Amino acid sequence: MTRRILLIAFHFPPIKVSSGLERTLALTRHLGAHGWEPLVLSASPKAYPGVSDERMGQIPAGTVVRRPFARDASRSLAIAGRYPRFVTLPDRWASWLLGAVPAGLSMIREFKPELIWSTYPIASAHLVGCALHRLSGVPWVADFRDPMVEYDAREQRWAPSWTALRRWRLWTEGLAARHAAALTVCTRGSMKILAERYPQADQRHWTLVPNGYDETAFQSAATLPVPPREDDALVLLHSGTIYPTADRDPSHFLRALRRVVDQRGPQARPLRVVLRASSVEQLYAPLLQELGLQAHVRFAPAIAYQQALAEMTQVDGLLVFQGYTSNPAIPAKLYEYLRAERPILALADDAGDTAALVRQLDAGIVTPLDDEARIAQSLHELLARIESGRWQPVAAALREPFERAHTVGQFAQLFDRLSASVPRPS
């Protein structure tokens, strides 16, 4: 017998931002194979910062999707581009609750789902999930993915630094710890933070379900025409947004790159770095000019999802930028990098989950984000491995646990346990 589950997700096609939609989209595509019918409660596309029909075709035919009212307060309440800060609490899309809770209750009455699942990074999604659980009695699963609040013991400061936002997020976490039948996260670091923060909570159903990659998307990407290379250059790629914070700052890498280019000399193969869809061109263009790297670093525009995957498989190496304050998180793109079968230079803290995964799978080289000398040494080593062929892609058997169909199976096992063990009101 097919059971139903209500998925609450702000990020869902046709939104055109981040990797936030991948987890929910994978559930809609693969839960049916495990006897679960997904119902999706998302938001009006008018609330999205950008839209694209590119991923709409991946929503299975017949999937029930409701998109109630929602607006972005930073746009709809702005006057001359300015708006009061408090309207962004708990996030810019809090207006979504006004439409999502009634719409969700209507879906629960109509379709009678056995479970509710909500997913971060929009805190409002969990508030909707909690409200629907409390009003209907349907068990709720809160998917936190990465931590909502973190403490930097090295600098003795909180993130987010804004006290009001941090309190909202901690309050939302507390609701989930008290009322959710299960919590799910993407990394061990995230699980550790939540377990230590809420030791009194029932953690029997807290589950680690990693992010992953979509094998069918890579197979489709393999059919795309390959653009010819301009020359014999070695090409390293960073695919996706580079957030303009110290935690993602590529300036030490760029300075190390200048060293490496000079040390390799004019007779070596040219070296180029592509920063695809980085959104930081204006910020770092002056540094490129100062270092004379214009011929070696190219800021490239965003491209379609499958084209981006194809590009990952065609370059010589892949880059990750992640400082120590993100140690409990693993960038979603890293799993796609693993499937792309290219060596990875992970500029990440030695103690973080990203470094641990790269080392565990022998997927590349780990070096600190902020150590120019070590970055230069590691970049030399990566290039030597590439040019000599002294590297092997991650074996399929090691990366397959991160394929989206497999991770959906982990969710399905959790849903099965909850369906069998959590009592329902009469």
Image: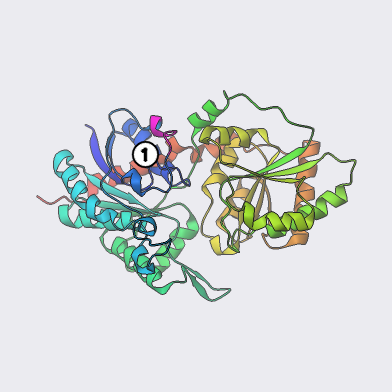
Q: Residue furthest bottom?
A: 156
Q: Which residue is mark 1?
A: 27
**Nearest the eye: 132 or 103:** 103
Q: Is residue 389 left or right of residue 301?
A: right
Q: Is residue 313 left or right of residue 35?
A: right
Locate residue 256 relative to residue 176 in the image: left or right.
right
Taking the spot 35% from the left edge, 58% from the top edge, the residue there is: 73
Residue occupying image coordinates x 71% and y 38%: 316
Magenta residues: mostly which secondary structure?
Answer: loop
Residue 373 belongs to magenta span:
no
Let me know if residue 198 appears in the view.
Answer: no
Image spot of residue 19 (x, y percent): 47, 45
Instruction: Please identify the quarter of the rendering in which residue 162 is found.
Output: bottom left
Q: Where does the magenta region start and end?
A: 52-57
Residue 269 visible in the displayed image: yes
Residue 23 rendering spot, x and y as whole percentages: 41, 43
Give the crowd class for mark 1: few <14, some 14-19, many >=20 residues within 10 Å: many
At mark 1, the secondary structure is: helix
Q: Amino acid at mark 1?
A: Leu
Q: Quadrant of the N terminus?
A: top left
Residue 204 pos. (x, y %): 33, 56
Image location of residue 190, percent across then percent down: 46, 59
Tell which residue pokes out farthest to the front in this image.
Answer: 80
Residue 311 appears in which quarter of the rendering?
A: top right
